[in-house]
Amino acid sequence: MERPTGNLFEAVQLAEWRARLTSFVVGLFLVEAITGLVIYLAPFSVTAQVSVVVHTVAGLLFAVPYAVYQVHHWKTNSQRPFNQHKLLGYLCVISAAVAGVSGLVLTWQAGMASRISYAWDLAHLISGLAATAFVIWHLGIIVLRHRWQDTGEKALQMRGAQAMFLRRNAWILVVTVVLVVVWVAASPMRPLYREFPDDYVLPFGDNPFAPSLAMTATGTALDPLTLAGSEGCGVSNCHADVVEEWQPSAHRYAAMSPFFQGVQGAMAANNGPESTRYCGGCHDPIALFSGSKNLYSDDLSQHGYQEGISCVACHSIERTDVRGNANYTITAQPRYLYEESDDPVLAWVGRFVIRAYPRQHMASWTRDLYKTPEFCGACHKQFIDEEINNVGWVQLQNQYDNWKASRWHVTDDPEASITCRECHMPLTDSTDPAAGDELDYNRTPDDGKHRSHRFIGANQYLPTLLDLPSADEQVRLTEAWLRGEIEIPEIADKWTTGPAVPLQIVAPESVKPGEPIKLQVIAVNNKAGHDFPTGPLDIIQAWIEVVVEDDNGNVVFASGQPGEDNILPSDTTIFKAEAIDQFGNRIDKHNLWEMVGARFKRTLFPGYSDVATYAFFCPDQSMLASAGVEGGEQMERRGVDPLTLDLPALEGTTELHVRARLRYRKVEQYLIDFLMPDSGLTATITDMSTAEARIVVSSN
């Protein structure tokens, strides 16, 4: 086929420079290049986020016109001899095609998937930079050649066409810049910090959040919305599984718990509203940091009541100290454009920008600190000091130091240790965009798992009491956890099997009627990485119930059975603590602001055991006949009703059946009756482990 003449090529070139399609395609390409560089090089800002939207829209508008232009351009220039200009043209086509395809994939992922692919993102970045360089090189050589080498009337026409082309491009850029400027001006970032209320007082020193040790990075109050909006993390294919797990968790209801609210109200009434800041760092951070816990405040949890320890509150912590009492520093993190909008369209745009431009999102909420026990230790360690009790320092719950001194912590060897998150945040199958972790010693970036945010521990009562989402499942898992039935594959080679706290009964093989019987029940902290029980031990109750029956089901001896009022008998073997005030009175309403010490504490350190001893007589009918009133009262105190006991005949051989149970409830009945009188409520009781034994009774 005969090649086109030079005059025909010049006419084609002139027509292309004059064509509006050429100007439109190149103008949009320049918009793509400039906004792409802003996204890549500029710091996180409204401008960068608007550039993401403009870049995406311009890319979609660019795709079809560019394809039409490129086909036409190739047809009209394919017969030209191969040279450096043609080589650059092919490189432009290849790099632009890769950038276009990868851009469309990323747009779909940002709009419809849970996250963008980093491989596609890298391909888009490299091909976009390459296409920009090749296009500038390709067009620049042509323009300069016409400017410096060509002369005559045709050269003037070519220069005029190129000038028209440049003016059109300039107008496209000007319109785009004006649009971005107006958009940015109309979309200011919401302030992260705010001033404290005018009546905000500082009775505990310079720290505005004392007596909590929590602090903001700037020392100023936060806008309450800065730490709120947890449910927004779970919409539009984002962290839905994580939010679902968090909703019935103890972190979520830390502030809305009626027991927390009741104790906080009593503390405010007795010690002043400002003293409740002591509780806020761990239970109520949104209210604390927004300045709500202050004199004359009608509602000490008016901000954050429904969220407690929110997603953002936990993930905004940048520094911790294991002194306890919420000794951490929280840094307000900038939020994305429209991230908190109530308008569904704008909210979707905000989530699109987060996924398309995740750099700030990841920098804000992801830190290696969160993988350490020291992160948990900031709150899971507590003490009272003089500013609260007016006496001096007293150690309270302390899970962190318990764990560090236990067999589950091996100094400088994380692979041999078992940490907080491995137990309480076990790995679960996940499609979450944050699934996988290449920095964890036993995980990979593509393991398809995330750490559960149910924070399963020991509260099997409040999720259903508060009627939280998936409360039944939370309670089921918590009770299974208390019994030691949940397996954790990642630590199976380091953990132990069986109940969390198993029981063993030591009893005589046989007795004669009328002989004394001595029973021992041994409890072992088999699995807990800290004391069992742990937490506020003046509230929690774990106890051993022992029941001895004859062959006919008659009770011979009993201990640890709640009465009709759900109060435990005073002789019950119980694991808890009894705090006292400075006058020796028992702290029985969680009135920690009056606490100066403890007169009783019984817990099980990890791997250690405790023995409960019980003694009673193996009764016979002659004992009952001669017991009289005094003997009957003694038997009643031991749990035996001498008026109804139907003992077996003495002839032959029979057996006594011994059953022991380790029982647990999160809130003792006395506190429920005090905080919620006439409610008829009682805490759920979970049987953690059981043991049985038989004692042969022989008259021979």
Image (cartoon, rainbow, N blue to C red):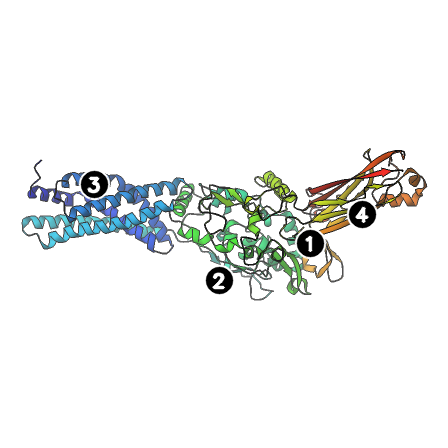
Q: Amino acid at mark 3?
A: Gln
Compared across the picture, whether 496 is left or right of 153 comes to right
Secondary structure beneath dot 2 equals loop
**Separation (CA) of disc 4 from disc 3:** 92 Å
Marks 4 and 3 in Cβ contact (< 8 Å) = no
Q: Which residue is at 44% across, 44% downward?
A: 446
Report if residue 166 is visible in the image: no
Residue underneath mark 1? 590
Q: Which residue is at 38% across, 49% downward?
A: 357
Q: Which badge, 1 or 2, comes first in the chain's sequence? A: 2
Q: Which badge, 1 or 3, comes first in the chain's sequence? A: 3
Q: Give the position of the N terminus as an image quadrant.
A: top left
Compared across the picture, whether 58 is left or right of 657 comes to left
Compared across the picture, whether 617 is left or right of 78 comes to right
Q: Which badge, 4 or 3, comes first in the chain's sequence? A: 3
Q: Amino acid at mark 1?
A: His
Q: Give the position of the C terminus as an image quadrant.
A: top right
Is 209 above or below relative to 637? Answer: below
**Separation (CA) of disc 2 from disc 3:** 55 Å
Q: Which mark is residue 218?
A: 2
In depth, the one of 292 and 431 nearer the eye is 431
Residue underneath mark 3? 70
Report if residue 678 is visible in the image: yes
Residue underneath mark 4? 614
Secondary structure beneath dot 4 equals strand
**Separation (CA) of disc 1 from disc 2:** 33 Å
Marks 1 and 3 in Cβ contact (< 8 Å) = no
Q: Dot 4, crowdedness within 10 Å: few (<14), some or many (≥20)? A: some
Quadrant in which residue 71 is drawn: top left
Q: Amino acid at mark 2?
A: Thr
